Image: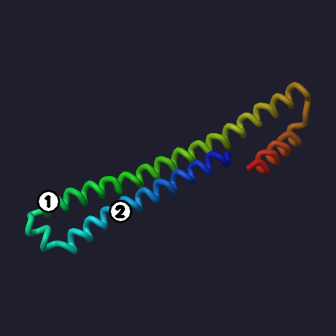
């Protein structure tokens, strides 16, 4: 489970830095355009500057969606592992109660102690 959390953390941080870089590039395009507006206007480059900025912003807008996907999938896998371990533990403990005659209360206490200490 720790592996899933670390992988999710890595992907989210990677997507965050990717989005920040894309926004910085879009800001750089705007800064250069505004700083040299006389030159841009004299060569009628407004449409080109707007198109270039829009392309950079499209890249920047994709980053949060990818970050959300990585977070959602990582959290889903972590919850799946937790519930799968609970299910496997309950199945095995019920088998011990039925086949070996263990006490139900004692088995539940041991199961929750093992599962909570393993997290």
Q: Is residue 119 left or right of residue 53?
A: right
Reply above or below: 26 against 85.
Answer: below
Residue linked to disc 2? 23
Task: Answer with mark 1 or mark 2, whichever residue precedes in sequence.
Answer: 2
Q: CA distance from mark 1 to mark 2?
A: 20 Å
Kindly identify the residue that appears in the image at 56 percent across and 52 percent down.
Answer: 10
Quarter of the figure with residue 48: bottom left
> Percent from the top left, x then y, of residue 65?
41, 51
Q: For the image shown, how many numbered marks are present on the structure?
A: 2
Q: How is the image coloured?
A: rainbow
The image's mark for residue 38 is: none
Quarter of the figure with residue 83: top right
> Percent from the top left, x then y, of residue 52?
23, 57
- Seen from the viewer's position, the closer of residues 56 and 67 is 56
Extreme residue in the top direction = 99
Crowding at mark 2 (Cα within 10 Å: few <14, some 14-19, many 20+): many
The image's mark for residue 47 is: 1
Element at label 2: helix
- Seen from the viewer's position, the closer of residues 45 and 98 is 45
Reply above or below: 31 against 53.
Answer: below
Q: Is residue 83 left or right of residue 59?
A: right
Quarter of the figure with residue 105: top right
Reply above or below: 31 against 87.
Answer: below
Q: Quadrant of the N terminus?
A: top right
Q: Is residue 65 left or right of residue 118?
A: left
Kindly identify the residue that appears in the image at 13 percent across and 62 percent down.
Answer: 45
Crowding at mark 1 (Cα within 10 Å: few <14, some 14-19, many 20+): few
Element at label 1: helix
Kindly identify the residue that appears in the image at 26 percent across and 54 percent down.
Answer: 55
> Percent from the top left, x then y, of residue 9?
57, 54
> Percent from the top left, x then y, of residue 46?
14, 63
């Amino acid at each position: 489970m720790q592996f899933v959390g670390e992988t999710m953390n890595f992907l989210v941080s990677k997507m965050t830095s990717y989005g920040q870089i894309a926004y910085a590039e879009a800001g750089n395009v705007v800064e250069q355009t505004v700083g040299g507006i006389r030159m841009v206007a004299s060569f009628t480059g407004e449409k080109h500057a707007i198109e270039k900025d829009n392309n950079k912003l499209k890249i920047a807008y994709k980053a949060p969606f990818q970050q959300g996907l990585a977070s959602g999938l990582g959290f889903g896998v972590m919850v799946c592992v937790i519930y799968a371990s609970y299910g496997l533990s309950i199945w095995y403990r019920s088998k011990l109660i039925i086949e070996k005659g263990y006490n139900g209360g004692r088995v539940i206490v041991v199961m929750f102690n093992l599962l909570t200490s393993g997290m």
